[in-house]
Amino acid sequence: MVKSRTLILIWIVFAAALLAAPEFLIGLFGHVAVGLAGRAGLVDVGLLDRLTADGFVLAGWLGAGFVQFVPVALMWLAGLCAGVWLASKFRLGRWVPLVLVVATGVGAWRTITGAMRVEDPTVQFARQEMLDEIHTRPGPVFINPSGVLDFAPLAPEIVGSVPFKERYERLASVSRWREAERGEPSASVLFAGRVAEARGMIEHLLASPDWRLAFVNGAGLLFVRDRGPDFVPRAPAEIGTGLPVEQRARLMAATALRYEDAGLRTAARGLSNSAMDLAPEDPQVLAAAASIAASQGRWERARSLAERALKVDPNSSSARFLLASAELQVGSPAKASEEAARLVRRSPRDVQALWLHARAARAARDPMSEIASLERLLALSEPGTVEAGRIQIFLGQAWAQRGFPDQSLGAYRAALATPLTEAESSEVRQAIETVESNRLPTGG
């Protein structure tokens, strides 16, 4: 009888695990994207992401979902079985039903809240629209790293074989880009995902006579190598036709952001205003409008829109980032530092948030907070790179301001060991001389 009762409890526990398991759906697209990039040798990835990609290749989204489901379900099952065992061992049988109810409730809540975070369908709409445009132009496509993660699960055949590190190096240097193009020319170039990582290259292609902007939508910017007509922004009524009003507004707002990236500033502002007319209280629409206002230097407007977005959705990271940026620009560094600190607490590995917090803390004359974010940035950067060197320069300045010459000199000397420009190296050497000359003499 006891064994039978225990078996029944275990099956109830497994049912609770199943209720929690749909949490695996959250971020499934991202796991597949990263796994596919790793499978193609573009970037190093963890075992679970690689297995998820293998499942996707073998059985599509069902296979990928199953791989993600197994560890979640097993962890819940193991944890709750342990709870049943402990309750039985210590004769707490009367608490077992309560434990199961609570666990099931937690699982259900995580499932419901998780479902609310599933990717906006307008994102997939925009990506498919971009793919349709790409497929009309045969030939190799160069995609920026974060753009690869946007499109790998939808069209793995277009992402190519260039490793992420090499892609970043090409984006950072026009001469490196041109050299690579002479060896393996691309028919088109897609900038998607974090389009800001390709800002310099976008400016170069916009000014280049052998490339033209062919298409822009909420998913990104597409350049092609030909001499056809330049892209003309579509009328707001032509964007997202057939979508529900809220989704149309979000698609228009996302497209407006990409217009801004493409230098189509008037079109970006007009389309953003049209999106707000459709959905004036949608946090994504408000955050996009705040981003465009910030990009165009209208910081008071950006702050107002970001505050409105956060009232509707206090968890909007993009709105909080924009609010912190706006506070810094309008002369409220303490508020900017406070908002940026919230971002860092929520996403301690977010490089943009860490940089923003470091800048705000410096403006607020809070060197210890600045140092904390700079040291996190240093831990996330690749040793010996220019980026690591520049972080060390800021660390040297912050430690000097705090009155710690040894730490300051250590950071400056570490910066000199990286490939800085001649001007930067000269400034660092001068800073070292200043710190050394200002040190208190040691007693003899």
Image: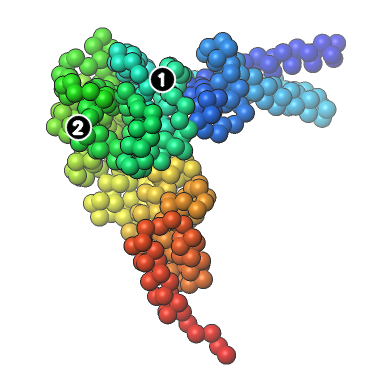
Question: Circle 2 sits in a helix, a strand or a loop, which is it?
Answer: loop
Q: At x 42% / y 61%, what residue is drawn?
A: 393
Q: What type is the residue that disc 2 sits on?
A: Pro
Q: Which of 184 and 307 is in front in this view?
A: 184
Query: In the picture, which quadrant includes the C terminus?
Result: bottom right
Q: Residue 209 carries which label?
A: 2
> For residue 14, which quarter of the picture?
top right
Q: Name the residue under label 1.
A: 158
Task: Give the answer, above or below, for where 186 lies relative to 10.
Answer: below
Q: At x 49% / y 44%, what residue is drawn?
A: 348
Q: At x 37% / y 22%, what residue is drawn?
A: 140
349 sits to left or right of 329: right
Query: In the picture, which quadrant includes the N terminus?
Result: top right
Give the farthest residue toward the bottom.
444
Q: Residues within 10 Å of mark 2 (few under 14, many from 20)?
A: few
- Residue 225 drawn at (x, y percent): 26, 25
Q: How crowded is mark 1: few (under 14 residues within 10 Å), some or many (20 or more)?
A: some
- Residue 221 drawn at (x, y percent): 28, 27
Task: Give the answer, above or below, for where 34 lies relative to 331.
Answer: above
Q: At x 75% / y 27%, what residue is drawn?
A: 82
Give the farthest residue toward the front.
183
User: Is residue 111 at least partly visible in the picture?
Assistant: no
Mark 1 or mark 2: whose residue is earlier in sequence: 1
Task: Give the answer, above or below, for where 386 lies relative to 259.
Answer: below
Q: What type is the residue that disc 1 sits on?
A: Ile
Q: Are marks 1 and 2 in contact (CB under 8 Å)?
A: no
User: Is residue 240 at least partly visible in the picture?
Assistant: yes
- Residue 220 drawn at (x, y percent): 31, 26
